[in-house]
Image (cartoon, rainbow, N blue to C red):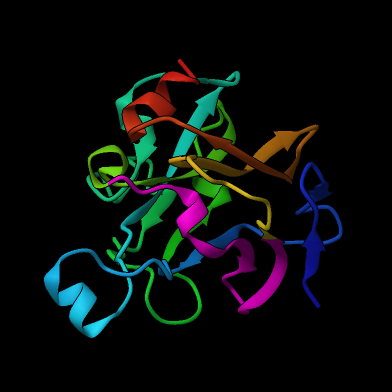
Amino acid sequence: MAVNLQKGQKVDLTKGNTGLNKLMIGLGWDEADTPSKGFFGMLFGGTQDIDCDASVFLLTNGKLANNNDIVYFGNLAHHSGAIQHQGDDLTGAGIGDCEQIMIALDKLPAKCDKLVFVVNIYNAVPRNQHFGMVNNAFMRVVDSQNGQELLRYDLSENYDQMTAMIFGEVYRHEGEWKFSAIGQPTKDPSLRELANRYL
């Protein structure tokens, strides 16, 4: 069974999981239950689509070295072959993962010591959208070799007026890979401002 994590909790991924080197990071959220704007929204009801974008930063000594170490909808694969983003979800509709990121730990550059997983709302400010309008946000870690869900982290706090989220980190410590549940909301209006935190 997967371990359900609380905010701030850390767990060892590879210790006790011999041979674990391929992960699937699934990030999910539900479409907003806020009524759609405009005449047709009032007439027919419905929900307001929110385009959340999942990204990963590859850090060296805790810092982002360059833009090539950001994997997101505009750069779906890292040049090392270690990370592959499976594509952009524009609405959050449906069940299960909205976006998935595949990680090959054994292919990560030796200098890389941390992966930071973030989600931001695309064009949040002009669309007047925020994470308080998003339901059931979660992050999960799956052993992609056998499909077993290892960890799950459900975000359940009030995130009104927050436009981005630092979900969690996979980091290297004394030869092992560990996971930390971060759950830090921010008011960063775009991926660029999120990335600036790690320069």
- Choose between 138 and 99: the one closer to the eye: 138
- Choose between 170 and 15: the one closer to the eye: 170
Q: Relative to residue 174, is residue 79 drawn left or right? A: left
Which residue is at 63% across, 50% downward?
158
- Residue segment shown in magenta: 128-153
Which residue is at 68% across, 61% downward?
154
Q: How many marks?
A: 0
- Choose between 106 and 119: the one closer to the eye: 119
Q: Quadrant of residue 147?
A: bottom right
Pick out the residue farthest to the left. Answer: 39
- Choose between 81 and 182: the one closer to the eye: 182
Pick out the residue farthest to the top. Answer: 199
The vertical placement of 165 against 34, above or below, is above
Which residue is at 41% across, 66% downward?
32
Residue 8 belongs to the span the image colors magenta = no
- Across and down, in percent, residue 121 comes to 36, 47
Residue 142 in sight: yes
Residue 64 in sight: no
The vertical placement of 111 against 51, above or below, is above
| Quadrant in which the C terminus is drawn | top left
- Across and down, in percent, residue 84 comes to 37, 55
Pick out the residue farthest to the right. Answer: 16
- Across and down, in percent, residue 73 comes to 27, 50
| Quadrant in which the N terminus is drawn | bottom right
Residue 144 belongs to the span the image colors magenta = yes
Which residue is at 13% across, 71% downward?
39
The vertical placement of 151 against 125, above or below, is below
- Across and down, in percent, residue 173 comes to 77, 33
